[in-house]
Amino acid sequence: MAVVKYFVSESIKRTEIDEFLQSKLERAGYGGVSISKTPLGTHIVIYAMRPGLVIGRGGETIRELASLLEEKFQVSNPQISVSEIEIPELNAYVVASKIASALQRGVHFRRAGFWALNQVMDAGALGAEIIISGKLRTERARYEKFKKGYLPKCGEPPTKYMRRAEVHVQLKPGMFGVRVRIMPPDAQFPDKIKIAEKFPPTEEKVEVPADEEKLEQETVEMKETTAVLTENKKEPEETSDGETEEKTE
């Protein structure tokens, strides 16, 4: 049970760090974090739309983040690096935070959902799903789903390729939740068959150099001569045996 408790505590710590960075780096367009342990310490990669805001003037913000992570979450020797998000529309955290900010500004939830869905699909995603839940129009909480494209939910491809994010926002009616699932364009599925337009390249014959050909010919000739000599040696032995038999008779 000690091993199970260790992994549970580590996963809780990761989610707490993720939520802390999400609230701290909201203006920088926070898009997720990856944490890996190394012999020198803990390597943390922060994905953001505007890396300059994460680094700060002369690295002031990133040093402050490192000290906060070390003090608050007991992260051993944090080494933070920042990576820019190439296509923000394919990042689930960015899309969910955009929808949440639109809801805070008073945009209708359907308009915000369809706008985000169209942006994700225009960026080249294979499929996307956005779920907005809360007191949308009445006092009773419900959810509305916006879905487009190819988006399987079970099997290996979703667990391997699907990008998920969940963001909560406090509004006048109550707490609203935004859940985003995106299937990126580089996802591979076992049921998708590609037909090759060209035949595979044929195996080319390896040209043997002239010196090697000569050596092969010489070895073949040597084998032939040795075979002839052995046959010639066997013939007189047979004749001599025949003569001795005649003399004895």
Image (cartoon, rainbow, N blue to C red):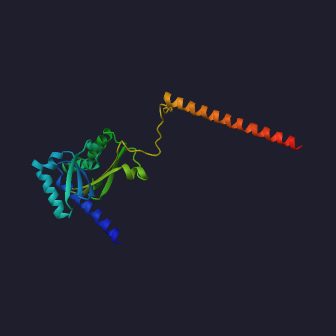
Write the residue at 16% across / 56% down. 65
- Looking at the picture, how far across and down is residue 71, in whole percent? 16, 64
**Which residue lies most toward the right here?**
249
Residue 71 in the image: above or below residue 125? below
The foreground one among 222 and 167 is 222
**Which residue lies most toward the bottom here?**
1
The quadrant in which the N terminus is found is: bottom left
The quadrant in which the C terminus is found is: top right
Q: Is residue 190 left or right of residue 123?
A: right
Visible residue check, residue 109: yes
Q: Is residue 7 left or right of residue 170?
A: right
In terms of image quadrants, where is residue 148?
top left
In terms of image quadrants, where is residue 4?
bottom left
In terms of image quadrants, where is residue 111?
top left
Write the residue at 60% across / 33% down. 222
- Looking at the picture, how far across and down is residue 163, in whole percent? 33, 50
- Looking at the picture, how far across and down is residue 52, in whole percent? 15, 45
Write the residue at 60% across / 31% down. 221
Residue 80 in the image: above or below residue 12? above
Visible residue check, residue 208: no
The foreground one among 145 and 140 is 145
